[in-house]
């Protein structure tokens, strides 16, 4: 059904673009063979939903091509637009997947690094303690030297 709507949209988008003032009445929409569409309301609503046309608000019979509809036609038509949109969506999905993979790899590296840090922590703690005691010892040694020097000067 959607494929048929897409074909009819392509045909009638071309028809709208080439019509005077880029407007048509719903009953002027045609099939692939050029015959009037038996129930054009469904197609008109579909095209309005896709923002290709605006249906007049009072009687809801006259359809006017939107700027977006004109751009879609100028860029190759409705089918081309759908293809380009599908490619763009696929690229976006691929980009999201790549980003998620990078984030996952980064998380794994961060976890490994955290594990290594935790593994090295006890050694680092002992080195810090030993360094602290050496600093206290050297500080006391300097104080003693200073005191000895003061006593010898008197």
Image (spheres, rainbow, N blue to C red):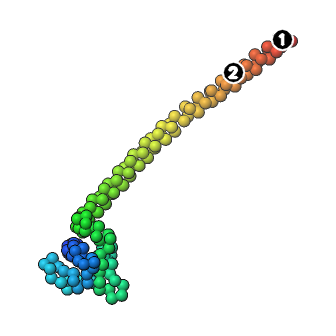
Residue that carries the numbered disc 2 in the rendered image: 138
On the rendered structure, is 137 left or right of 19?
right
Q: Quadrant of the C terminus?
A: top right
Q: In which quarter of the image is residue 13?
A: bottom left
Residue in the image at 15% along x and 76% along y: 32
Residue at (33%, 78%) from the top-left corner? 54
Residue 65 versus residue 29: which sits nearer the camera?
A: 65
Q: Dot 2, how many residues are within 10 Å of its Cα: few (below 14), some (14-19), or many (20+)?
A: few
**Extreme-front residue of the structure:** 20
Q: Residue 1's x, y, as percent?
A: 22, 76
Q: Which of 44 and 4 is in front in this view?
A: 44
Is disc 1 placed on a helix, strand or loop? helix
Q: Looking at the picture, does residue 67 appear above or below residue 128?
A: below
Residue drawn at point x = 33 percent, y = 75 percent: 49
Instruction: Answer left or right for 52 relative to 3.
Output: right
Vertical placement of 136 versus 92: above or below?
Answer: above
Q: Quickly name the residue at label 1.
A: 153
Image quadrant of residue 129?
top right
């Amino acid at each position: 059904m959607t494929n048929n709507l897409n074909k009819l949209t392509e045909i009638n988008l071309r028809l709208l673009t080439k019509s005077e003032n880029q407007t048509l009445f719903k009953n002027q929409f045609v099939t692939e063979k050029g015959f009037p569409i038996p129930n054009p309301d469904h197609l008109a609503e579909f095209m309005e939903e896709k923002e290709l046309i605006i249906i007049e608000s009072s009687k809801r019979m006259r359809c006017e091509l939107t700027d977006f509809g004109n751009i879609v036609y100028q860029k190759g038509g409705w089918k081309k637009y759908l293809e380009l949109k599908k490619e763009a969506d696929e690229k976006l999905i691929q980009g999201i997947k790549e980003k998620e993979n990078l984030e996952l790899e980064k998380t794994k590296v961060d976890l490994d690094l955290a594990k290594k840090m935790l593994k090295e922590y006890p050694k680092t703690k002992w080195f810090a303690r030993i360094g602290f005691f050496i600093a206290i010892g050297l500080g006391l040694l300097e104080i003693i030297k200073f005191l000895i020097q003061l006593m010898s000067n008197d």
